[in-house]
């Protein structure tokens, strides 16, 4: 009986947290976005919005832990706080991955799906924060390079959607590799795991696991893109090689860290 009560509590707490998240997103879009758009200094506006988002997600993650919905273990978080231009490339097992990474990264800019630009909860946030849409590959590379030049950490989920599960990843898109090669910026691989699975592509928010889920984040050593490919390789070929190398590197470490399970 106690297990059932506890699970029901986590269901209620999860629903309240997600409801508050959506409501705050709408309020942010309605109240903050117009102010940010009209503010004459776009750079300072973006810095303020990034700080607000970072603070909000820190509070949200802390609340989810406090009410017993989840636990969070992070290794190597200092690399996300280094405040230098870098491209974070992560796998994407759950809906909460972006929430956790934004909570850990003080000055971040995300590459987001184009669908979010029309989402009633997020349209104002992505615009006010000057996030980068993945709709146009050329514009993606140019905008990403501008954000890195301005000192922001780019957060990219190159699978484009949540991972399919069963200890495998979707093929990585090449946008992050093009940006890294063009800007000469290191790539910071980040591993994310959620056990038991929650907020996956297959599980709705109300599919509450039997116990609080544990999210683990492991930040690996940075990779220099030009060390992954030949110096004289054309840009398109180099981006293809870098993309495959980073996906292989992340996949290998997901198994090594026990986030993926080795099959006999």
Image: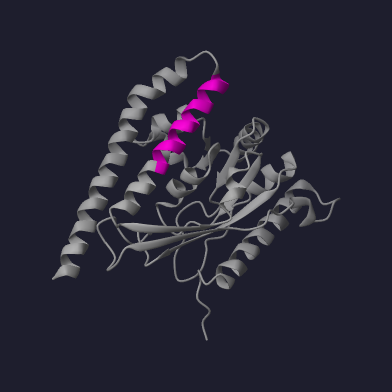
Q: Main secondary structure of the magenta part?
A: helix
Above/below status of 192 relative to 234? below
Q: Residue furthest bottom?
A: 264
Extent of the magenta region: 42-58
Above/below status of 48 relative to 197? above
Tell me if I can see residue 135 in this picture: no
Above/below status of 48 relative to 122? above
Give the x, y percent position of residue 27: 31, 29
Q: Residue furthest front?
A: 66
Quarter of the image for residue 243 reads bottom right
Give the x, y percent position of residue 75: 55, 58
Q: Residue at x 72, y 39 (%)?
A: 183
Give the x, y percent position of residue 44: 55, 21
Q: Residue furthest right?
A: 232
Q: Residue at x 56, y 67 (%)?
A: 254
Q: Is residue 235 magenta?
A: no
Q: Report the number of numbered marks.
A: 0
In this view, the residue in front, 158 or 3, is: 3
Give the x, y percent position of residue 61: 38, 48
Above/below status of 61 relative to 3? above
Locate residue 100 relative to residue 12 in the image: left or right.
Answer: right
Q: Residue at x 49, y 48 (%)?
A: 101
């Amino acid at each position: 009986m106690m297990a059932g009560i506890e699970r029901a509590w986590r269901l209620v707490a999860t629903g309240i947290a997600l409801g508050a998240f959506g409501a705050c997103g709408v309020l942010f879009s309605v109240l903050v976005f117009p102010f940010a758009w009209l503010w004459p200094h776009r750079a300072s506006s973006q810095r303020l919005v990034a700080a607000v988002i970072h603070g909000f997600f820190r509070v949200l993650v802390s609340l989810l832990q406090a009410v017993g919905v989840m636990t969070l273990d992070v290794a190597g978080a200092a690399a996300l706080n280094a405040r230098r231009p870098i491209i974070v490339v992560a796998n994407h097992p759950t809906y909460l991955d972006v929430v956790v990474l934004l909570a850990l990264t003080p000055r971040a800019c995300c590459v987001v799906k184009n669908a979010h630009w029309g989402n009633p909860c997020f349209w104002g946030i992505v615009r006010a924060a000057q996030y980068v849409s993945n709709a146009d590959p050329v514009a993606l590379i140019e905008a990403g390079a501008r954000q890195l030049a301005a000192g922001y950490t780019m957060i990219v989920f190159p699978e484009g959607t949540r991972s399919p599960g069963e200890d495998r990843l979707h093929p990585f898109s090449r946008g992050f590799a093009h940006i890294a090669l063009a800007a000469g910026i290191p790539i910071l691989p980040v591993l994310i795991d959620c056990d038991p699975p929650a907020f996956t592509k297959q599980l709705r928010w109300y599919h509450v696991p039997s116990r609080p889920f544990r999210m683990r984040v492991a930040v690996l050593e940075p990779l220099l893109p030009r060390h992954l490919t030949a110096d004289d390789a054309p840009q398109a070929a180099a981006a293809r090689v870098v993309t495959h190398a980073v996906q292989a590197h992340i996949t290998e470490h997901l198994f090594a860290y026990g986030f993926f399970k080795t099959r006999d």
